[in-house]
Image (cartoon, helix red, strand yellow):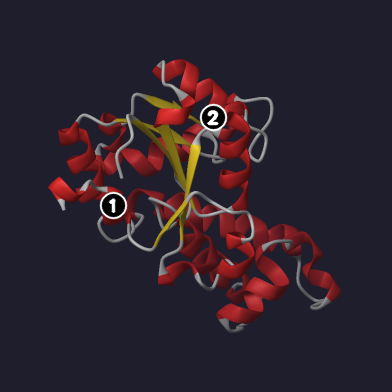
Amino acid sequence: MQYDSIIFDWDGTLGMTLHLWLEGYKTGLANQGYTMPDSQIMQVIFHAPMESTKTFPDIDPAQMFRDTRDYVQDNLATIALYDGALETLEMLAEQGTQMALVTSSPRRLINTALAPRRLHRFFSSIIAGDEVTERKPDPEPFTATLANLGAEPARTLIVGDSHVDITAGRAAGTQTCLFTPDENRLFHDFAALQAHKPDHTITALGHLLSPAQG
């Protein structure tokens, strides 16, 4: 793919933070004597942890979430990246592609995640969730990034794993790319995501590289 600029989502796109949160919920549940399969955590806990007492009345949801959040914060520095993420960023930088990062995570957390691998060096702009008035699916984070980069929307690609990335990107006038690796099947309904009609879909980040570069 040939674009002047690429704006990446972080959670579930470059960093495997969805998996980290899942492990955090396992820890938070275990602290209260609960063990359950990943699929049940996704159905009951992951998206609405404070409502977990509807199914498990003995759970203290506030404490579970605190334990989960602490686990995530303690392990962000060793977060796994998706296969080929670092190599793709390096190759795109060599090609002269301008890159940026937009995340719903707060600045403190994203800095903790990026620092160990010096990932900041790849991005001309980073906008965190606590630095905008409206988060995705509102286009504000992307329109602000386009302004920071001085980029043309039509020559810019947004890469993300969620429908909010596609919706916000379309509203900002950019091209959109849905990232659907096998590792994310537990967290997303890929067919439902495709209903939002992204311009491109990739299953590996290396697919962003131009043919000349592999």
Q: Is residue 203 left or right of residue 60?
A: left
Q: Quadrant of the N terminus?
A: top left
Going from N to C along the chain, the mark reached first, 1 or 2, is: 1
Q: At numbered mark 1, what does the secondary structure look like: helix, strand or loop?
A: helix
Side of 50 relative to 171 (left or right): right
The amino acid type, in three-letter code, at marker 1 is Ala
Q: Nearer the viewer, residue 24 or 208?
A: 208
Left or right of 200 on screen, residue 213 = left
Q: Which residue is mark 2?
A: 142
Q: Residue at 56%, 24% (x, y): give it.
A: 143
Tag of residue 58: none
Residue 85 circle label: 1
- What separation in Å lies between label 1 and label 2 (alpha carbons)? 21 Å
Q: What type is the residue that disc 2 sits on?
A: Phe
- Asked whether residue 213 appears in the rendered view, the answer is yes
**1 or 2: mark nearer the eye:** 2
| Position in image of residue 142 (x %, y %) | 54, 29
